[in-house]
Amino acid sequence: MAAEPARQIAPERSGGFPAWRAEPGRRELSSVLQSFEEAMAVPVDAASEADCEWEAWLDGGFEAHKFIHRSISRQSYAEVLGCLLRVNTHCQEEYPDLWAVLKFVPKKNGLNPVLALLASEGAQAVSIAELRPRAIRRRLDDLRRAFEQSWALISCYLSQPPSVREDLLWSARTVAEKAKTDQRSRALELLCLGIFGRRATLF
């Protein structure tokens, strides 16, 4: 089987926060996933620039994330998993301090073996079409949680000035490693949006 094709994540412009290419009202999953991947190419110090467009980037990201979350299904499972794989690979290469925490998200949600299979053998190898209904629900839930938690961490990290990131990552690693499966998403959401989020009252 052919391996999952590598699609390089590259920014639309050379500096600052990349613009979201997919229109908010567009209902094509493949376009939204591609836009999501491209928008992850944020220079590591972009949030420190004067007049940086972090708010527009966050708004577009949350809109895309909501659409992707609703669109995860038996048919779209491999496509969304591929997007997550490419985003994770990009973060591993470009933001090693973030990756030191982010890597626990797929691991704790049981996705590491599936992501490895996807990378080595391609989308057909991770198809869930023939699984029993209960197994399908579990796979879809695992992917939804991992995507949600990954976006929470990535968006908070990239929209913060570098001076704030160390405390975020220390706290997020504790949550990612220690929180129970059914509590991890809510705990990371509280941490990344309510405490360390750039729009948070406590920021």
Image (cartoon, rainbow, N blue to C red):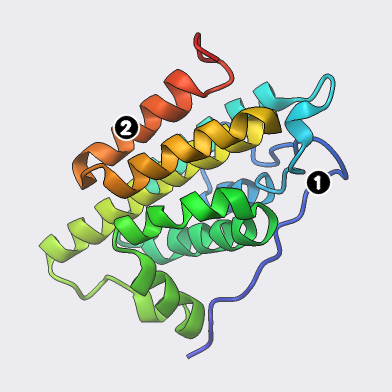
Query: Which residue occupies the foreground of this view, 149 or 135?
Result: 149
In the rendered image, the vertical position of residue 14 relative to residue 199, given as above or below: below
Residue sitting at 81 percent across and 35 percent down? 16
Residue sitting at 69 percent across and 56 percent down? 94
Disc with the residue nearer the chain's start (2 vs 1): 1
Q: Is residue 72 visible?
A: no
On the image, which quarter does residue 87 sit in? Answer: bottom right
Query: Which residue occupies the foreground of this view, 42 or 68?
Result: 42
Residue sitting at 30 percent across and 61 percent down? 74
Residue 27, position in %: x, y? 51, 42
Q: How many marks?
A: 2
**Residue designated by label 2:** 187
Query: Which residue occupies the foreground of this view, 169 or 113?
Result: 169
On the image, which quarter does residue 9 sit in? Answer: bottom right
Task: Answer left or right for 133 relative to 100.
Answer: left
Pointers 2 and 1 in contact (C-beta within 8 Å): no
Query: Which residue occupies the foreground of this view, 60 or 192?
Result: 192
Asked which secondary structure carries label 2, the reply is: helix
Residue 44, position in %: x, y? 74, 43
Residue sitting at 58 percent across and 36 percent down? 166
**Residue designated by label 1:** 12
Residue 36, position in %: x, y? 60, 46
On the image, which quarter does residue 111 sit in? Answer: bottom left
Q: Residue furthest right?
A: 14
Between the residue at mark 2 and the residue at mark 1, the CA separation in whole angstroms equals 33 Å
Task: Answer left or right for 19 relative to 172.
Answer: right
Mark 1 crowd level (few <14, some 14–19, many ≥20, 10 Å Cα): some
Q: Nearer the viewer, mark 2 or mark 1?
A: 2
Amino acid type assigned to the residue bearing label 2 in the image: Ala
Residue 186, position in %: x, y? 30, 32
